[in-house]
Each structure stands twice: as C-alpha cells, then as structure tokens.
Image (cartoon, rainbow, N blue to C red):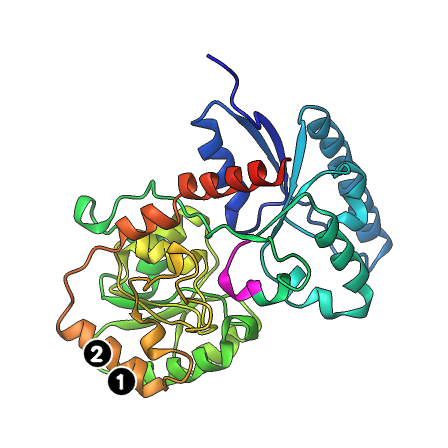
Amino acid sequence: MPEPDYPSVLHLSDPALTATRLAEAAAETGRTWRVLPLAIAPEPGTAAALAVKAGRGLRWEARLLAARARSRRVHVHSVLARRHAGWAFGRRFALHLHGTDIRSAQYEQRHRDLVHETVRTAQTVFYATPDLREHVAPLREDARLVPVPVSLTVPPAERAPRERPAQIRALVGDRDYLLFTSRWEAVKGGARSLEIARALTAAQADPSGPAVLGLDWGPLAGQAADAGVQLVPRMPHADFLAAVGAARLCIGQLSGVMGASELDALAADVPLVAPLEPRWYDGSHPSLVVPPVLGGVDLGMSGTAADVVDLVREELVAPAERSTRPWVQEHHSPQAALDEVLAGYRDSGW
C-alpha cells in the first residue's frame, strides 16, 4: 500500500483538544501525527518557582527537539509559541488560530509584530471559529475555516443511560438540571450569561423543577454563584462529557459563536440554547448554515434574558423531537476536520 501524503506531522499545542482529534483521525488513515502540548509552569514569583519553571521549560524543549526530529512538518496551534519555540517551526509551517492570539494579542503592541509576521509567513493558515474570520482576513485572505472537532465516542442518550458523574450527583442527586457549559468570562459573553443565570434561577425557583448548574471556572464564577447558579468543580474531560450528556438542557456561551462545549451538547443530543451572531453564521461554509440549536441566528445577539427563559420553558414543557448528533458528525467530527486540514495542506503546496 502506498504511503499517504503528509504521513508525519507534529502538532504543537492542543487547544480544545483539536490537535488530539486530528491526530486520532489521521491515525485511522495510516498517518502518524504527534501532539506536543505547550509546557505549563508556575509564575516565577520566587526563586523556587523560577527554578521549577526553568526545569520544566528545559524538559519541554528536549521533548520538542525529539518530536521535531521524528516529524517532517510542523502544524502550530499557537502564534505566541513562536517566541520560544520558533526554531522548530521551520521555514514552511502550518498555522492554526484558535482565539486569543488572533482576536486580541495581535492588537497588543508587545505581540503585534510577532503575530502579523507569523500569520503572513505561514505556508497555510486555519482558524477554528467563524468570529475569527474578520481578525485574520486582513492578514491572510486565504485562511481556511476548520470547524472545531469534538469526540463522538460517547453514545447519545437514546443508546446509553444518562449516567451523571459524582460531582453532579453530589450537588443535585437525581434531580434534573440545566447546565451552563462555558466558563464565566467576558470573552464568552460573561455579562449576558450572568443576566440569563439570574433570570433562570428566578424562573426555576420550584424545588421540584430543574436545578441550574454551571462550571466553577472563570473570573466571573463567583458572580454566577451569587446569581443562584450551583457551581460544579472542574473535572476531567470524560466527566464533563457525562455531565453534559445527563443534562436536561444546556445553555451555551453568549458570545454569538459555538465552541467545543456547545458542540459536545449537540453531539450528545442534548437540547442547546445558543444565540448566534448572524454575521458569522452566514452560510459561507457548510457548518455555518442553520446549526440545530434553540435560538440561534433567530435569537441573535439582541435577544433578552426573558427571551432565553421563554425558550428554556418551552423546551421543558414540550420537548422538540430532534437529533443533533448527525449534524455534528457531518461538520464537527474529527474526520471532517481532517478533510479540511488535508485540503488546506494540498491547496497550499505544503
């Protein structure tokens, strides 16, 4: 059997497990794609912390050197990694933009030149969500959307019991619950999420109705608790998927775009309330044509907290018969992402 094209690629960094999902899909086609997450080290506030950071950095550099020696090409998932790992990129590298580096870092003076030069010199450029298009297009009109891939290994509800993890059971037992799937942060629409949380907790005051849960994650998490949301401790990804799959309904981020957490809900066939920005979900890519969410572009970014509460109430009283998993399979599976990435590689002549 002939060797497939792009048989050996090193993926540097792994935001939202995108590199992991791509590597898994690539392995099914006979390719060997390696993933090296960025090193995580404590802030060097003390001499001991500085020593720990230096040690971890050196060990990570050694791992990078070994991985680079075994890989023909590098696909980078962080622009800012070029500052300390640019030596491994080579002259022809693929670049994958996931959010902060292109949405905000390029507008900061300390990062601007690095971001612009890296985006402009990459052999091919990908971006993960449609809101990033307006930030990358002025630098690279040929940048390609690769919709965020999510795991489809967890069966949907009709094929498996909705087993809830211990973290959920400790809070609400067997009571139904609504789940805010995203972290409480401004970039995720935190202020609107808090407004909706207050309205939902007021509307769900009946102790026999669903509880309102959210993740204990993000700088606004304390305000979410003050709004009446019961916070679930950070948990392993498998437990998070179980928590999503056992929810009666999920509320996505209020930024106008869907990320991996929202897609996890759709993959589990759990109803998802998600206001979407019509400018981004404009049909310019197959994944941007009427995603199967409650609200969506019809609710848009002008919908009120009362509008969201009405959507939740309607779904709880009269659940719509729908399966959202096939849509995720078509547009956000690891295999779909791999096809987009390979097309980008080939079209660029990489």
Q: Quadrant of the C terminus?
A: top right
Q: Residue at x 31, y 56 (%)?
A: 266
The residue wearing badge 1 is 203
Q: Residues within 10 Å of mark 1 (few under 14, many from 20)?
A: some
Q: In the image, is 87 to the left or to the right of 284?
A: right
Residue in front for this viewpoint, 287 or 59 = 287
**What's the residue type where badge 2 is placed?**
Arg
Q: In the image, is 168 to the left or to the right of 224?
A: left
Q: Which residues are magenta?
A: 127-133
The residue wearing badge 2 is 313
Q: Are marks 1 and 2 in contact (CB under 8 Å)?
A: yes
The relative height of residue 43 versus residue 18 in the rendered view (above or below) is below
Say if residue 165 shows up in the picture: no
Q: Residue at x 81, y 56 (%)?
A: 44
Q: Residues within 10 Å of mark 2 (few under 14, many from 20)?
A: some
The relative height of residue 42 versus residue 207 in the rendered view (above or below) is above
Pinpoint residue 164: horizontal percent, then vertical percent.
Answer: 29, 54
Tell me the element at label 1: helix
Tell me the element at label 2: helix
